[in-house]
Amino acid sequence: MATLYTHKSENIRRTWTLMFAFIVLLVAVGWILAYVLDYAALLPVAVVFAVLTTVGSYWWSDKLVVAMSGAKPLAKNDDPELYRIVENLTITAGLPMPRIYVVSDPAPNAFATGRNPEHAIVAVTTGLRQMLKKEELEGVLAHELSHIGNRDMLVATIAAVLAGILVMLSDIFLRMMFWGGGRGGDRDNRAGAVLMLVGMITVLVLAPIAATLLRLAISRKREFLADASGALLTRYPDGLAAALQKIDAVAVPMRRKGDAISHLWLADPTPNEKKTSFLTRLFSTHPPVQERVRALQEMSV
């Protein structure tokens, strides 16, 4: 029988399996480029540049996300009940007290960010605060605190680094091919031409798509993991399940729904955009609400 602990361990295992697949894809693309372009230093140079730029974004992630979301700091006296809920949950989870922010938006939603638990932020929208009952709000906040406790920002950063490297390698490959780079001798025979064609298709088309799909798959798995971890924290999976059902029923899009932070929200910030087909679900940052609710309901049995 599935339990809170089996769901959590299963989601952790799946997430790191996807990360391993990401790394294998990166190494494969790097090897193809190094061979076709006859430039062995290409991969390490791209890796260093992508890591530096992405880690910089990770280090200042809280400030960037706050600016992009329009969140404002919330004083304890502004909402004592909300502060009490967060304090109780952080004590239970063994986490430091995060800063609490509010986003003036009628769409019910929430997010957590920050490079580590000591620099974490939890934010809720005004719509979420007005709509949910206390036990439902506890479920949502436990979910967001679980993102902090599970170090999801670190996992997301690693995924972003790998995806950025693949996109950068694709761009470098295109520019070098345009300027006549590569193994000239191979172009004079059929085998070399075939290898060049395969390399171009793989790097320019398939690799960036595969990188995006893997990054989004990791994002969806982290949502399932945070659901399971949050249920462990409150010991009441039905609270979060009820909150997700309410949010899904309202289906109000966020005023600020930039793609850069869409994966951070508790629920998809563009709910009115139907994403029921297999292809659109592959490119979604969030798993379907029905699947999340079903998993939570199974935990409460």
Image (cartoon, helix red, strand yellow):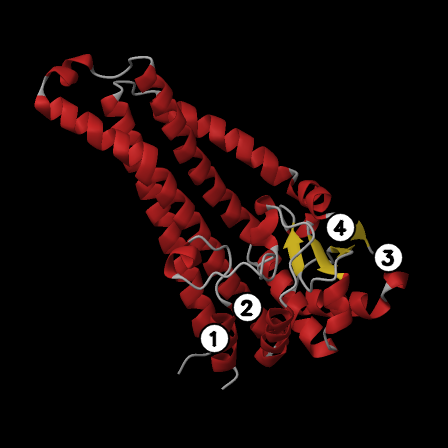
Q: Give the residue type that dot 1 points to.
A: Ala
Between 269 and 80, the one nearer to me in the picture: 269
Mark 2 or 4, nearer chain start:
4
The secondary structure type at the circle numbered 2 is helix
Q: Give the residue type that dot 4 points to.
A: Ala
**Contact? badges 4 and 1 (CB < 8 Å):** no
Between 210 and 138, the one nearer to me in the picture: 210
Residue 16 in sight from this viewpoint: yes
- Of the residues tagged 3 and 1, which is closer to the observer? 1
Give the quarter of the figure containing the N terminus: bottom left
Residue 4 in sight from this viewpoint: no
Q: Total of numbered circles in the picture?
A: 4
- Please provide percent x and percent y for residue 255: 70, 52
Crowdedness near tag 2: few (<14), some (14–19) or many (≥20) residues, C-alpha within 10 Å: many
The secondary structure type at the circle numbered 4 is loop
The reply, left or right, for residue 200 in relation to residue 10 is: left
| Residue that label 4 marks | 71
The reply, left or right, for residue 261 in relation to residue 175 is: right
At horizontal 19% and vertical 13% (from top left) the residue drawn is: 184
- Please provide percent x and percent y for residue 242: 62, 78
Mark 2 or 3, nearer chain start:
3
- Of the residues tagged 4 and 3, which is closer to the observer? 4
The secondary structure type at the circle numbered 1 is helix
For residue 284, above or below residue 154: below
| Residue that label 2 marks | 227
Q: Give the residue type that dot 2 points to.
A: Asp
